[in-house]
Image: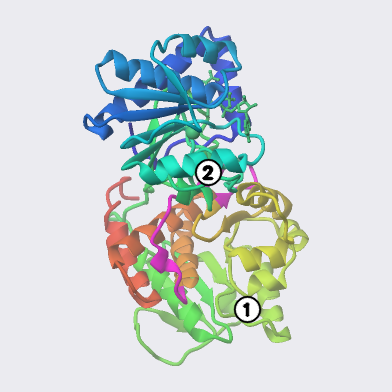
Amino acid sequence: MRQIEGAAVLTAADMRAVEQAAFEQGDSAAAMMRRAGQACAAAIRRLSAGSEVLVLCGPGNNGGDGYVIAATLAADGHPVRVAALGTPGSDVAQQARAGWVGPVETLHDTAPAPVLVDALFGIGLSHPLDPAIAQALLVLIAAARLTIAIDLPSGVDTDSGALLGCPAPADITLALGALKPAHLLQPAASHCGAVRLLDIGVSAPDTMQVVAAPALPMPGPHSHKFNRGMVAIVRGRMAGAAELAAAAAMHAGSGYVALLGSTIPAAPHALVRRKLNDESLGDPRIGALVVGPGLGRDDDMRATLERALATDHSLVVDGDALHLVTPEQLRARGGQMILTPHAGEFDALFGSSDAGKLDRARAAAQASGATIVFKGADTVVASPDGRARLAPAASNWLSTAGSGDVLAGAIAACLAAGLDPLGAAAAGVWLHGEAARRCGPAFIADDLACALGPARAAVAGAVPPR
Ligand SMILES: NC(=O)C1=CN([C@@H]2O[C@H](COP(=O)(O)OP(=O)(O)OC[C@H]3O[C@@H](n4cnc5c(N)ncnc54)[C@H](O)[C@@H]3O)[C@@H](O)[C@H]2O)[C@@H](O)CC1
Ligand SMILES: [K+]
């Protein structure tokens, strides 16, 4: 049982492809189910501390896992009952069912137990739960002291994270072989409780991963302020937003941060204030240029944005700038670009849709040629090359004014430090989440920017000095 940071994330189709590849290498579905069920049983035995376990078994292979779990617990002398919904459909699930020699109650008639194991449905759920099934599950969850979902809580859509009748959250979800998008995307993620990953002996590709602590370059004896990574930030109509992004870039480790658009001295004095003109915008030492926080959307600011786009700098495009560009314009510009839309900005730029957040982010990256940081309680980072990073849940206190500006600055610092756009975006998201964790409750964005330093210190030394 392991933590999820850095773990592979697979859609239902990806998971089936990985399983199929394992079968072609000589593995069998029965052996895989045995490994999955036994790994779950070992975790459940520890978590239940001797209390009676009720395993709910569905009609598919998730139910098959449930029968293996029950048989393994019983063989270890652990008190366990089984209640089923239908009879197993696949050969492998029937085989697992045959391995359970105790009685099988029905979902609708069974009595609650202190520990409930939900092995009704996993990645094969194809339509919303019947309300009678959801109600029976709800009653058992409410009566249990601990609910453990196998692979996924029953009643969530694997790929989009939508709820398909899931009646109540589990306390713990044991993900099998890899994470699925629903473990990270809302609202399903909130129904998973604590997610832990169990190895079932398959090797998953790393195209999609959970955001993990980044490896960030450390300054060495040859470092100076510019080769640490210079960030420039365009100041717009709401100056505070750009100031926050600048503070964030400084605390996230940038060696030199310039605010373009004002020369009036003010704290912090480490921030270099310069006029916004062709010379300052064209400074070849700039490693990342941030445009959009507090920019404004009038014609002057549109012209300022055009000037930023006309440079060949790596760009972080945030806030108002996301209302002033089109995906086609960005694609035509090319170069390294990271866009950081929240849901409203995403809709404005790419159009609204009922598709899942991961699919939308990946499509947007394709359309714009930019790395997309689709922000929210379930931030998704998608690269035009198809790779993606999904953030684990972060502090809900991040829902405060200016936290997006801080994220843009943190990402810019990582981009200027030499990370590729996907790496920089994921590193910025991690630093932002870690800074929020360190801030505790009710922080303001200024505190969050300052906490990026300690967050950065937590990964100091990850890579040698450059
Ligand atoms: N393929 C394998 O060998 C392995 C599969 N594993 C487990 O198998 C799961 C996937 O198994 P399946 O593909 O059989 O899918 P599930 O067991 O998640 O569900 C499929 C079954 O549910 C029925 N169903 C779907 N939606 C329903 C609804 N709304 N109401 C009522 N019935 C519904 C389907 O007709 C089918 O019988 C994984 O989540 C994992 O738990 C693991 O054991 C690892 C090995
Ligand atoms: K389940």
Q: Which residues are magenta?
A: 381-402
Residue 135's disc number? 2
Residue picked out by circle 1: 278
What's the residue type where badge 2 is placed?
Gln
Q: Position of residue 56 (x, y in %)?
A: 45, 29
Q: Residue furthest top?
A: 26
Q: Are marks 1 and 2 in contact (CB under 8 Å)?
A: no
Placement of 142 over or under 319, stated as above or below:
above
> Is 148 on the left or on the right of 128, as rendered?
left
Q: Nearer the viewer, residue 114 or 161?
A: 114
Image position of 186 (left or right of 147): right
Q: Residue at x 37, y 20 (%)?
A: 70
Question: How is the model colour-coded?
Answer: rainbow
Q: Residue furthest bottom?
A: 264
> Can you name the residue that lies furthest to the front here?
109
Residue 457 position by quadrant: bottom left
**Of callouts 1 and 2, the N-terminal one:** 2
Whether residue 397 appears in this view of the structure is: yes
Image side of residue 459 versus residue 102, left or right? left
Q: Residue at x 46, y 51 (%)?
A: 190
Q: Secondary structure at mark 1?
A: helix
What residue appears at the point 43 percent right and 72 percent down from the top-left corner?
Answer: 257
Which residue is more in the foreground, 428 or 4?
A: 4
The secondary structure that most of the magenta stretch takes on is: loop
Residue 185 at least partly seen: no
Mark number for residue 58? none
